[in-house]
Image: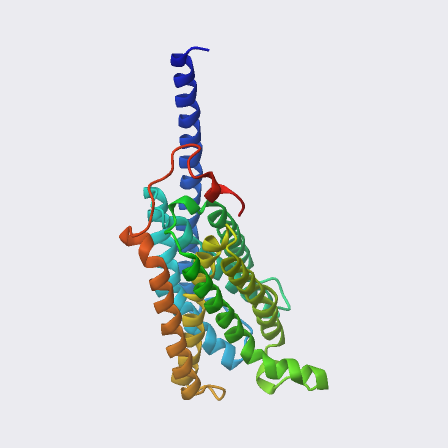
Amino acid sequence: MDALTRAHSRTDHERVIRIDRDQRRGWLAGSLFALGAGLIANSLLGPLVADVISYPFSESVWNQTIGLEAVTLLLVAPLCIFAGILMVRGHPAASPVAFGPAAYTAYMMLQYVIGPEYDHYPGVLPLHLALFILGAGIAVAAWGAIDRVRLPELSRRSERRYGILLLALAAFIVSPYLPALFAGLQGEPLTAEFRADVSMYWSIVLLDLGIVVPATIAAAVALISGAPWGPKSLYAIFGWFALVPPSVAAMGIAMVVNDDPNGSTREAIVLTVAAAAFAGLAVWVYRPLFDGRGVPVPARPGADMRRHEGG
C-alpha cells in the first residue's frame, strides 16, 4: 500500500469515527431535550401548578413534592436543555453537565413510582417510568461520553483534596441516618412522620445509603489513589450534589411556608445554607470547563494514550 492510499484510508477511518461520534452526540442531545420537556410537564401537572396528578401522600410529603417540583421546573429541566445545547455544539462540558440532571431524575423518579404506595394503576405511571428510563440511560451514556482528554488537568494535590472533600460529603449524607441505624439495633419503631409514608422513607434510605454514599466513597478513593477515572467521577458526583441538596432545601421551605406540622424554620435555614455551599462547590469545579483554563486541545490519534487507559 503506497503513502497516498494509506492517507486516504486513514482519512476515511477518521471520517467514520467523526460521523459515529456526531450521531451519538445527536441522540444524547435529543434525549436531554426530551428529558427536560418531560420534567417540565410533570412539574406543571403536579401539585405545584395544575394539581392534576393526585399523589396519595401525607401532608408533609405533599408539601415536599411542591418544593421538589419547583426546583425541577426552575433548575433541573433548564439544565437538561442547556446540556443538550452544549451537546449539539460539541462543548467539552456537555457530558459532565448532562450527568447531574439525568442522575437526579433517576433518583427522584424512583421515589415517584415507589413512594405513593398506589393501590391502583395510576395514569401517570408511563410518564414516570419514561423519565426514570431516560434519566438512568442518559446518566450512563453521559458517563461513557466524558472525554478525559478534554477535562481540565488536576494536580495530584488537587485530586487528593477533592477526594477528602468527597469523603466529607459522604459523611454528611450518612449523618442524618445515624440515629435511625442505632435505633434499628434496638428494634425501635419508625417515627409518626415516617410511618405516614413508609415506602417513600425506605426508598430514600436505599438510594442514599445504598447508591449515593458508596458511589461518593468510590470516587473519593479513585481521586486519592490517582485512578484514571477519578476526574470523571469528580464531575459526576458534584453534578448530583449540585441539584439534590437544593431540592431538599426547597422541600423544607415549602413545609414551613405551608405551616406543615413537621416543618422547621431552623432546619430549612440549615438546608438552604448547605444547598448554597454545594452549589458553590459545583460552580468552582465546573468553571474551568467553560473558561478554557487547563482544558487541553483534543489529542491527535495515538497521543497521550496514558489518559485513555481505564475508566
| Relative image position of residue 2 (x, y in whole percent) | 42, 10
Q: Quadrant of residue 129?
A: bottom right
| Residue at (40% x, 13% y) in the render | 3
Percent coordinates x, y for residue 167 in the rendering: 51, 69
Left or right, 227 with reference to 4 = right
Q: Position of residue 14 (x, y in %)?
A: 41, 27
What residue sits 50% from the left and 50% below the top?
228
Q: Residue, x 47% and y 38% (percent of image)?
A: 305
Residue extending furthest toward the top:
2
Q: Left or right: 135 with respect to 3?
A: right
Up the image or down, 126 lies above or below 164; here it is above
**Vertical arrangement, residue 141 with respect to residue 192, above or below:** above
Up/down of 49 relative to 146, above or below: below
Of residues 204 and 185, the one nearer the viewer is: 185
**Nearer-the-camera pick, 122 or 115:** 115
Total numbered labels: 0
Spot occupied by residue 290 in the image (x, y as percentages of width and height): 30, 53
Query: According to the image, what is the colour scheme of the structure?
Result: rainbow
The answer to whether residue 30 shows anywhere in this view is no
Quarter holding residue 221? bottom right
